[in-house]
Amino acid sequence: MAGTINRPSTAFEGSTFRSPRRKDKDHLNFIRSLPCIVCLSQNRSQATHIRFSCPEVDKRETGWAEKSDDLWTLPMCKKCHDKQHAGSERAFWDRKSVAPILTALALWAVTGDEERGERIIRRAKM
């Protein structure tokens, strides 16, 4: 006869299980409405997810087949987005003099306000 497994309430505390990715369709649509953060092109932007970690804001690095939460996104045209994926992501942002984590957080704070979002994009250079 099978028995019941009784686990203490703290059984999975501190485990390495990942929480589900937080998605926000409205925020992604807002990001896509903004100009490219690199070249300022007004052509249809893509929502680019930042993959590298930033412990200061509790952002973990994502794996190859994984996207980060939707709050970690920036608007980029297809051409710039392809370049961002062509090598080291950190090196790409350093070359472009953009602070991606700070900018993504600023855009998250004003999501839906396109005027403020565009100002943030235009001032995003470090």
Image (spheres, rainbow, N blue to C red):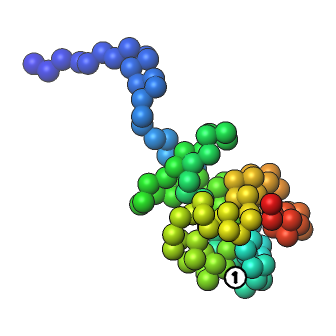
Numbered-mark total: 1
Task: Give the vertical position of 77 relative to 5 (above or below).
Answer: below
Left or right of 107, for residue 44: left
Residue 26 in sight from this viewpoint? no
Task: Say if 98 sits above or below 84 in the image.
Answer: above
Q: Is residue 7 left or right of residue 61?
A: left
The residue wearing badge 1 is 44
Q: Position of residue 95 (x, y in %)?
A: 68, 68
Which residue sits at x=62%, y=45%? 54
Residue 77 in which image quadrant: bottom right
- Is residue 124 rendered to the left or right of residue 19? right
- Residue at horizontal 69%, vertical 53%? 101
| Residue 62, percent from left and from top | 49, 52
- Residue type pointed to by label 1: Arg
Q: Nearer the viewer, residue 103 or 97?
A: 97
Front-lying residue, 36 or 93: 93
